[in-house]
Image (cartoon, rainbow, N blue to C red):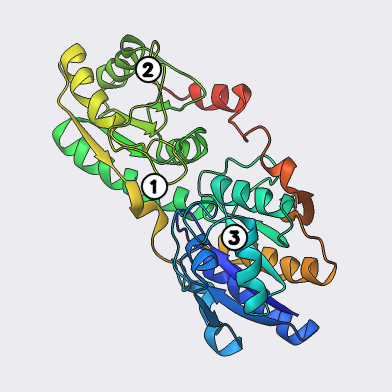
Amino acid sequence: MKIGILTSGGDCPGLNAVIRGIVLKGTTSYDLEFVGIRDGWRGVVEGDFVPLTRHEVKGLSKVGGTILGTSRTNPYEGDRGGADNIAKTLFGHRIDGIIAIGGEGTLAAADRLSKDGIKVIGVPKTIDNDLRATDYSFGFDTAVNIATEAMDRLRTTGDSHQRCMVAEVMGRHVGWIALHAGMAAGAHAILIPENPMSLDEIAELVQSAHDRGRAPLVVVSEGFKLKGMDEAFSDKGLDAFNRPRLGGISEILAPEIERITGIETRSTVLGHIQRGGSPSGFDRVLATRLGLHAADAIVDEAWGEMVAMRGTDIVRVPFSEALGELNTVPQYRYDEAAALFG
């Protein structure tokens, strides 16, 4: 059996560890053959495949990014897109099925293709940790560690100048990175999509910290909305799945905080630095385990399902469960952190 492996959507630490886990177990335990699909769904549509053996995956667990490349291509667009054309392309290359490693957009495309007759197994990937079907997704722990270190650095320069520092982290619909990194860094306010706040409420927290002699640190998710905002701030257009490209809310908040409080305020958008570099030890292990279990799923012909983490176990769930309600930050978790604000 020959299986194609692709990574699609935003890159994140741990993708290469998944690829390594799949290939090593698939070749040694099940005598499967693998090909890498270049640049996500684009490679599926265009038939861009490369051999993927033990040689190509050696030492990959510690390497960030993805050796296969990635893109935000919609597999149903273009002259060669669509399930019928993709089926012909796979048949022509004697590829029996696909393992798609990606987040919400990737798995939605995988689900649609699966329903249209393409054999697909999913592996969840999102640094946002926003897929409810899995307790944790690889890349999240690394992103939190990177964000925490960046905030520790911002705090030292903030302390030196008695400035308020606003750190913007990723989090389109959910605030897990902001919550965890903000708590770890001792933030005086954490702003997440699940809990809109007004400028006056934010300024009050900043002023409270400043009055105690602290240099305020505000952590904000890119998807945060002020009270009264209908949509998250975006001025960067749409991606291939017609979703707004977020980023820049901190640059809106910082001058407003300074205007209301009179405290000199600076903003920093961490952006793609959260997705770069080597994965943490936790993410290396989680990604590898997901890869190993994805190889098992191939042999069991668990098409239309994805591997996921439940507790400390790796299980399988249907795509429909993965694409249901997002894994949002529950109110009690936010209330825990809020006790530390101001």
Label 1, label 2: how far apart the Cα atoms are: 22 Å
Residue type (three-letter) at the residue carrying disc 1 = Ala
Q: Give the quarter of the figure containing the N terminus.
A: bottom right
Label 2, label 3: how far apart the Cα atoms are: 33 Å
Label 1, label 3: how far apart the Cα atoms are: 24 Å
Dot in front, 1 or 3: 3
Q: Quadrant of residue 322?
A: top right
Left or right relative to 289: residue 222? left
Q: At 72% from the left edge and 73% from the top edge, which residue is drawn?
A: 96
Which is more N-terminal, label 3 or label 1? 3
- In x, y percent, where is residue 170? 41, 41
Residue type (three-letter) at the residue carrying disc 3 = Ile
Q: Give the quarter of the figure containing the C terminus.
A: top left
- Element class at badge 3: strand
Label tally: 3
Instruction: Residue at the far front: name it.
Output: 79
| Viewer-proximal residue among 256 and 2 | 2
Residue at the spot of label 2: 226
Left or right relative to 52: residue 298? right
- In x, y percent, where is residue 227? 40, 12
Q: At 45% from the left edge and 62% from the top edge, which residue is drawn?
A: 70
Q: Quadrant of residue 248?
A: top left
| Viewer-proximal residue among 19 and 176 | 19
Instruction: Residue at the far bottom: name it.
Output: 55
- In x, y percent, where is residue 174? 52, 33
Identify the disc placed on residue 338.
none
Left or right relative to 291: residue 229? left
Residue at the spot of label 3: 101
Which is more N-terminal, label 3 or label 2? 3
Residue at the spot of label 1: 147
Left or right relative to 41: residue 99? right
